[in-house]
Image (cartoon, helix red, strand yellow):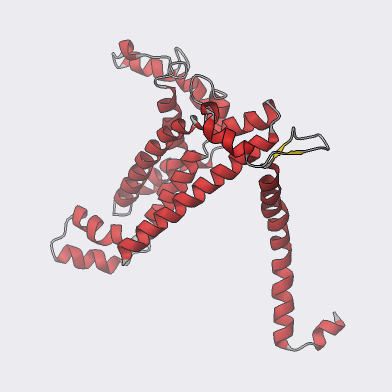
Amino acid sequence: MFVFSRLNYKTQKKILITAFLAVPLLLLAVFSYLPLVWMFIYSFHDWNGYSKNMAYVGLKNYIDLFTRPEYFSVFKVSLYYFGASLVQIALALYFASVLSFKLKGKEFFKGVLFFPYLLNGVAIAFIFLYFFRPDGTLDTLLRILGLGDRIQLWLGNPQIINFSLAGTSVWRYMGFNFILFLGSIQSVSGDLYEAAELDGANRWHQFWYIIFPSIRRIIELNLILSISGSISAFEIPYIMTGGSNGSKTFVIQTVDTAFKFQKFGMASAMGIVLLSIVIAVTLIQRRIFSEKEV
């Protein structure tokens, strides 16, 4: 401490900044980047996860992944979550736009919309298990409304199970998109709305010509998060169905490959492919948005 006090201000500043950054950077390297490096190495090996010996197999895991339908075909399930994420963003943007204007009771509705995101994912999965089960909440509501003939096995019919799970995902995550949109909309200067009203602009004109251009970056962020989230959907389908009846996502397949079938090499290759797809989609999306800005 005595030596430190003798140093000049710039040196002290550099030492303090380095000291504060060292711990989080070390944790980031140990728990994020180092496992990624090892996952990349494992993807070129045949390994059961606990044996001391790993057999180098080159690109065999990647070739099997792209040529065997049982591994890659589960990506079709992600399309349900991707479609649901677009609905989720549209609803979140609609509610955020409406509640950004003067409206009676809007604070209450903000809380209602954001509350599901605060709940634990496991709790939500169990709530919707009761909601969708035979003679559960949804079936009871349909009977009250006189729609008893429309009752289905919501989690047992392969034709509709992914719609049920994707709907649950929308309910779970819409609050997150909503709060991002709401924050960005509220950052828009109120003078713009007043000037628009003086020019005779209605709510739609205010949304299209003021709100939408102002929150373009947030829309882009939500799209990136939604695409990556739909590709990596895991928590809700794994807890509610365990991937049965055609609801297995790519991440569930990866977990089963690693821990059920003890093929850590193949599972690592699947993880690398998933990461590559997310990065590629993000870069393509940013490229499209940047070209439009020009």
Write the residue at 81% across / 34% down.
51
Residue 93's place in the image compared with 268, above or below, is: below
Residue at the spot x=33%, y=50% of the render?
99
Res. 217 image quadrant: bottom left
Quadrant of res 2? bottom right
| Residue at the image point whose x is 48% and y is 17% from the top | 133
Q: Position of residue 61 (x, y in %)?
A: 63, 36
Q: Position of residue 291 (x, y in %)?
A: 33, 62
Residue drawn at the location 57% of the way across and 27% of the way down? 239
- The answer to whether 34 appears left or right of 243 in the picture is right
Q: Residue 101: where, in percent of width, then height?
A: 29, 54
**Does the rendering let one see residue 110?**
yes
Q: In the rendered image, is residue 179 in sight? A: no
Task: Pick the quarter of the image with the C terminus.
Answer: bottom left
State the residue in front, 54 or 153: 54
Residue 260, how many percent across, how many down?
Answer: 68, 26
Q: Residue furthest right?
A: 2
